[in-house]
Image: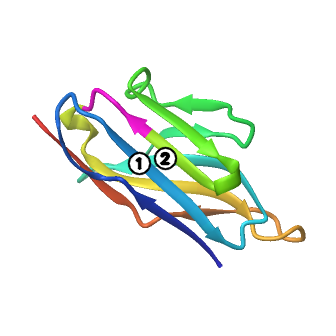
Amino acid sequence: QVQLVESGGGLVQSGGSLRLSCAASGSTFRIYTMAWYRQAPGKQREMVATITRGGTTNYADSVKGRFTISRENAKNTVYLQMNSLKPEDTAVYYCHANIAPDSATPYRAYWGQGTQVTVSS
């Protein structure tokens, strides 16, 4: 059983900052790429940022230069530092990870339950 638990969402004014965390627990033999996605009301879920196990990162154009993804492999945790937040960043943010539960099982994708981020103008 694998769980991804996010924390750190909330309400912030435009220009402010928030830091999201996502910790994986349970059968986590090896965690590969971890990522953050977001979904605004009435819109499709979109990728925000990804980070490989080795630390290679990728960002959506809309957040480049403002958001930073990082991870601590020893803690099975991924972070998203969000600076210079804009009202259009308002969404539910979801953690995603590709995890192999043991050495004999291929990895599969897991999602967290989501955390709300609201940016007021």
Q: Magenta segment: does it hold 82? A: yes
**Label disc, if present, on residue 69 of the rendered structure:** none
Tell me where residue 42 appears, x and y as whole percent. 24, 53
Image point 31% across, 53% down: which residue?
9
Q: Nearer the viewer, residue 103 or 71?
A: 71
Q: Looking at the figure, which quarter contains the N terminus?
A: bottom right
- Name the residue carrying label 2: 36
The quadrant the C terminus occupies is top left
Marks 2/1 in contact by CB < 8 Å: the verdict is yes
Report the Cα–Cα distance between label 2 and label 1.
9 Å
In the image, what residue occupies the spot 62% across and 39% down? 51
**Residue 74 % position (x, y):** 70, 52
Q: Earlier in the sequence, mark 2 or mark 1?
A: 1
Please report the residue visible at 34 percent of the width from the left and 58 percent of the height from the top.
115
* Quadrant of res 61: top left
Figure check: 121 above or below 110: above
Q: Residue 63 lies in what quarter of the image?
A: top left
Q: What's the amino acid at mark 1?
A: Leu
Task: Kindly report the secondary structure that dominates the magenta region of the rendered protein.
Answer: loop
Q: Position of residue 75 (x, y in %)?
A: 64, 55
Q: Seen in the image, is 44 located left or right of residue 76? A: left
Q: Is residue 25 left or right of residue 68?
A: right
Q: Which residue is mark 1?
A: 20
* Coordinates of residue 33 in the picture (x, y in percent): 67, 47
User: How many neighbours does mark 1 have within 10 angstroms: few (below 14), some (14-19), or many (20 or more)?
Assistant: many
Region rendered in magenta: 81-85
Q: Amino acid at mark 2?
A: Trp
